[in-house]
Image (spheres, grey):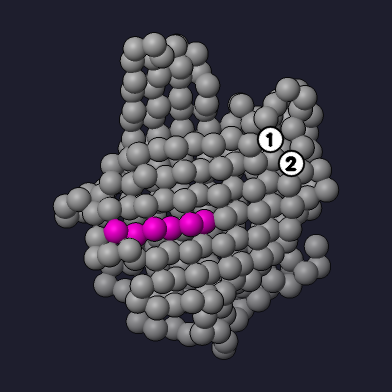
Amino acid sequence: MRIATVIVVCLLSAPALAQNPAPPADPLVGTVALGYLATSGNTDSTNTNASFKAIWDRGRLWVHNWSALAISARTNGVKTASAEAAGYKAQRAFGTNGYLFGTGNWRQDEFSGYDRQSTEAVGYGRKLVMTDRQLLTVEGGLGRKQSTVNDGTKLDETILHGGLDYQIHLGENSLFTQKLLLEVGDENRYTESTSAIKAKIRGNLALVASYVIKSNSDVPVGIENTDRFTAISLEYGF
């Protein structure tokens, strides 16, 4: 973990290479979203989802991100999906378009084969495309991951962390985003893809349609490797 230690030191002591523009007018922004879908007839099903995101931008030198997500689905009274997640990420500007980061994530999904997964990682990210319409960011780093399999087995491994974040404005009031998370270890490879389209309704309200794919390479017998979640949510921005 010597490389990870060096990255942490740089994260805390790289003012000479970082730009320090004036802080934004409102450094704290975020969104709260809630979705619900119910069908009845031959099949009765209900799906609910809730999410929270907040960004505290201290003039780009330091940026802090918080996120939380909860998904639940029932079919004919039987729970078919249940997932919760929470995360924190700190970014320290490093050069014009780069940054160093430290992140921690927690996930719980009783249907994935893994009761809990927690990760901590540090690394480097860079904005490859920055225009008024598009933004493309990639990042990579090293970390640790602790997992609890549904049968009670506990795993602790070193991981390679990779990420991609793409945004494109489709019009004045619509935005498409694509995010990809990759955690590669000796015991398991975890990937998560989130695609979303957001359309502004009025003021701070927007309608969001999202599609999430979560996959674990190694799961217990009888468990599918991949879970998929489709959601339509009403989002409020602050």
What's the residue at 41%, 51% (across, down)? 196
| Magenta residue span | 174-179
226 w.r.t. 204: above or below: above
Going by the numbered disc 1, the residue's amino acid type is Asn
Going by the numbered disc 2, the residue's amino acid type is Ser
Where disc 2 sits, the SS reads: loop
What's the residue at 57%, 74% (across, down)? 126
Cα distance between the residues tagged 2 and 1: 6 Å
184 w.r.t. 44: above or below: below
Q: x, y percentage for residue 71?
A: 46, 32
Q: Quadrant of residue 168?
A: bottom left
Q: x, y percentage for residue 181?
A: 60, 54
Q: Which residue is mark 2?
A: 217
6 w.r.t. 146: above or below: below
**Depth order, front residue of 90/191:** 191
**Depth order, front residue of 42/112:** 42
Q: Quadrant of the C terminus?
A: bottom left
